[in-house]
Amino acid sequence: MVEAITLVRVDNGQSVDINMDDSPYYVLSSCSWGQVEGDANTVKYVRQLGKTVLSSTVGTRDVKIVGWVVADENGLMGSLKDFLNQFISPMHFIKLLYDGKYVTFLPDKSVKYETGYESNNDTIAKFTITGTCYDPMWHDEQASKFIAAETVSMFHFPLRFHDTPASSPEVVFASIVSSTTFELQNVGDVASGIVIVMKSKGTVVNPYVKNVGTQEKLLIKKTMVLGESLTVSTTIGDRYVRQGELDSKGQSMFKYVDADSDWLQLPVGTSLMTFGADSGADVLDVYVVFENQYLEVQGCY
């Protein structure tokens, strides 16, 4: 049984806890997110036994949340309903967090309240929230991050020197962590897109990331200068190349993606990856962020 969930508005980060035990105002009665259905594109030839599957897709997922607004003070019910009415809107996506994972849905309609006095009064009010997950996959709440190459600052101020050299420790200005070949592990149920962040500590010409096993390669045909950063997302439906690091909304650099590039997807299991450049790979910091994706999570029954 699902006993506790958290809803988060994607556009502004507002959140509300809805559970059976600890929530003082919004109490969970039931929560269901159904199952996803597959749709196969098939063809049948003359005298063929059965059918040939050409391709398959996965459909959407429906969400239904039933709960109670509980108000102990006079006049509080109105403000609690006002918040929920503003929070749930068919114009804004909602993240449903459960057990360390989340799925995103768009409400189908505004909040529905029961009409009978016994279930909608100044003390309690029963509500229903429904929506559709156009991306039906569950994602890890905490994304996985792998650092392939990074320069870590080690110098701290103030720094004191002693009169005798033997008494003075070694001064380390920076630590360089670098591995041009690295492994990424996808423990989810399906292949996942990745986000690649490249930071230049000098001049880097035409940086790339490649899957060693499949030989798929994502190449950026650009000369990066000292201090420049690029963020590349290969997630289907959200592909982009931008100036700046992960959370920035910098200028689009999509035009620099080589026409023959592959939008790397991380297969289920372990993938051996590598990065490089035509020149300057030794002054390139690279890290990769991705979320495992799951068809189902335990607990919805």
Image: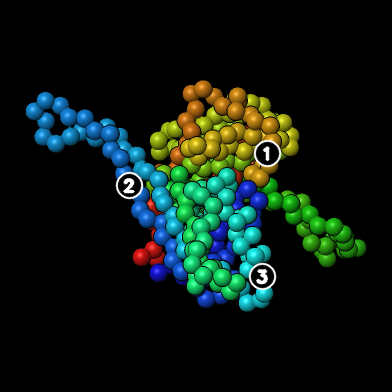
Which residue, given by chain and number where applicable, does mark 2 sit on?
37
Q: Label 2 amino acid? A: Glu
Residue at the disc numbered 1: 249
| Whether residue 115 can be seen here | yes
Q: Horizontal placement of 111 versus 151: left or right? A: left
Q: Residue at x 40, y 38 (%)?
A: 213
Coloured how? rainbow
As displayed, is residue 34 above or below residue 254? below
Rounded to the nearest angstrom, the CA distance separating label 2 from label 1 is 35 Å
The local secondary structure at tag 2 comes to loop
Camera-near label (2 vs 1) is 2
Residue 36, position as x, y percentages in the image:
35, 49
Identity of the residue drawn at 41% across and 51% down: 62
Q: Earlier in the sequence, mark 3 or mark 2?
A: 2
Dot 2 or dot 1, earlier in sequence = 2
Q: Answer with the quarter of the image where residue 231 lies.
A: top right
Q: Quadrant of the N terminus?
A: bottom left
